[in-house]
């Protein structure tokens, strides 16, 4: 069995699958990064991805344009982020409770909305058409290179965009005045306010960007990955993104590497499920087990770091 597993993962199609599976997790992870930098915890990424996946697909179906579908999903994600910000920052609701409410809306409210808009229950399989699915791109020259071309070429447009956004997020946070304000508010809101930074405005911008990133992830899920919307399709990716952000220490590049780790775990689950003699229940646990192990290692690292920098009393 071990030999079969090694033969399965030491192939280009396995690494291709890792990149494809990582993309929606990476979008949500970047959303968690920008929110965390502003001192806001967007626990509602899971629900936001579910809701934006539905609206992105429906808008693409109504307009017969995948581009408008993606833009619609991003807009809905930003609006959900602003809604959470309104309840947390204006009405002083606990941001965690606001995020839980969005997750509950994503889990149950989307089924009601689907039925209300289309009369369907549970999935949109009957509405799928080529015009509303995100196209793939074959990269010239690279697609001619053996193995490398099989890994890097032929992905959906949003897959490449997800990894491009890692660099753009880094530029935003560390090379622009907006990013400086976001980091200043996250590190010390009172100090930022004392020099004229509008703390509320910055937090609204950050959580709206966080929702927009989750919107990209939702659109990817329904308009490419699953090729249609169905209940439960996000399958914990929003929560995995929070873990990836924590393991990546809140930095774009580190969070990308953590997302790749979780994407590899998801791809490994798919490969292992095809092997004979392996329990399906054990296979289903792989991504979540990796998440738990990753968070434990992160917690141990943080504890050691705090102990190392703790001030010892002078004798």
Image (cartoon, rainbow, N blue to C red):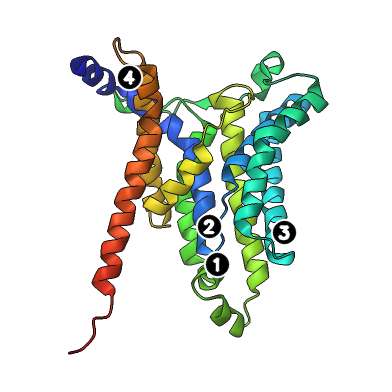
Secondary structure type for disc 4? helix
Q: In this view, does 2 lie above or below 248?
A: above
Who is closer to the viewer here, 62 or 39? 39
Q: How far apart are marks 3 and 4 (CA)?
A: 43 Å
Q: How far apart are marks 1 and 2 (CA)?
A: 8 Å
User: Could one spot residue 268 in this view of the protein?
Assistant: yes
Q: In this view, does 177 lie above or below 226?
A: below
Q: Could you say where residue 240 lies in the image, as x and y percent from the top left?
A: 46, 41
Q: Nearer the viewer, mark 2 or mark 4?
A: 4
Between discs 2 and 4, the one toward the N terminus: 2
Between discs 3 and 4, the one toward the N terminus: 3
Q: Name the residue under label 1.
A: 182
Q: Is residue 65 above or below residue 207?
A: above
Tell me if 195 is positioned left or right of 296 in this view: right
Which residue sits at x=78%, y=26%?
62
Answer with the quarter of the image where residue 6 lies. top left
Between discs 3 and 1, the one toward the N terminus: 3
Q: Mark 2 points at which residue?
A: 34
- The answer to the question of whether label 1 and label 2 lie on touching residues, with beta carbons closer than 8 A, is yes
Q: Distance between the residues labelled 3 and 1?
A: 20 Å
Q: Mark 4 points at which residue?
A: 272
Q: Nearer the viewer, mark 4 or mark 1?
A: 4
Q: How far apart are marks 4 and 1 (CA)?
A: 42 Å
Q: Could you say where residue 213 lies in the image, as x and y percent from the top left?
A: 58, 46
Secondary structure type for disc 2? helix
Which class describes the residues within 10 Å of circle 1: few (<14), some (14-19), or many (20+)? many
Which class describes the residues within 10 Å of circle 3: few (<14), some (14-19), or many (20+)? some
- The answer to the question of whether label 3 and label 1 lie on touching residues, with beta carbons closer than 8 A, is no
- The answer to the question of whether label 3 and label 2 lie on touching residues, with beta carbons closer than 8 A, is no
């Amino acid at each position: 069995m071990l030999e079969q597993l090694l033969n399965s993962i030491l192939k280009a199609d396995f690494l291709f699958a890792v990149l494809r599976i990582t993309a929606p997790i990476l979008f949500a992870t970047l959303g968690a990064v920008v929110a965390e930098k502003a001192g806001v915890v967007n626990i509602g990424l899971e629900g936001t991805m579910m809701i934006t996946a539905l609206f992105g697909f429906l808008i693409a179906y109504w307009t017969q344009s995948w581009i408008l579908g993606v833009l619609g999903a991003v807009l809905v994600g930003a609006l959900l982020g602003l809604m959470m910000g309104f309840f947390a920052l204006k009405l002083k609701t606990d941001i965690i409770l606001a995020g839980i409410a969005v997750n509950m809306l994503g889990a149950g409210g989307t089924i009601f909305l689907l039925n209300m808009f289309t009369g369907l229950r549970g999935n949109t399989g009957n509405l799928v058409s080529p015009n509303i699915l995100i196209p793939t791109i074959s990269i010239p020259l690279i697609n001619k290179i053996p193995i490398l071309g099989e890994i890097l070429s032929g992905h959906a447009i949003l897959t490449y965009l997800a990894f491009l956004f890692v660099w753009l997020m880094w530029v935003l946070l560390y090379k622009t005045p907006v990013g400086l304000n976001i980091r200043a508010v996250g590190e010390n809101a009172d100090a930022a306010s004392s020099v004229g930074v509008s703390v509320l405005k910055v937090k609204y911008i950050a959580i709206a960007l966080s929702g927009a990133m989750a919107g990209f992830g939702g659109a990817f899920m329904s308009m490419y990955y699953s090729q249609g919307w169905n209940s439960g399709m996000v399958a914990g990716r929003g929560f995995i993104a929070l873990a990836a952000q924590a393991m990546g220490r809140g930095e774009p590049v580190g969070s990308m590497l953590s997302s790749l780790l979780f994407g590899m775990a998801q791809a490994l689950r798919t490969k292992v499920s095809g092997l004979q003699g392996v329990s399906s229940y054990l296979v289903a646990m792989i991504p979540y087990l990796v998440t738990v192990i990753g968070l434990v290692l992160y917690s141990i690292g943080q504890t050691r770091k705090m102990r190392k920098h703790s001030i010892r009393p002078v004798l």
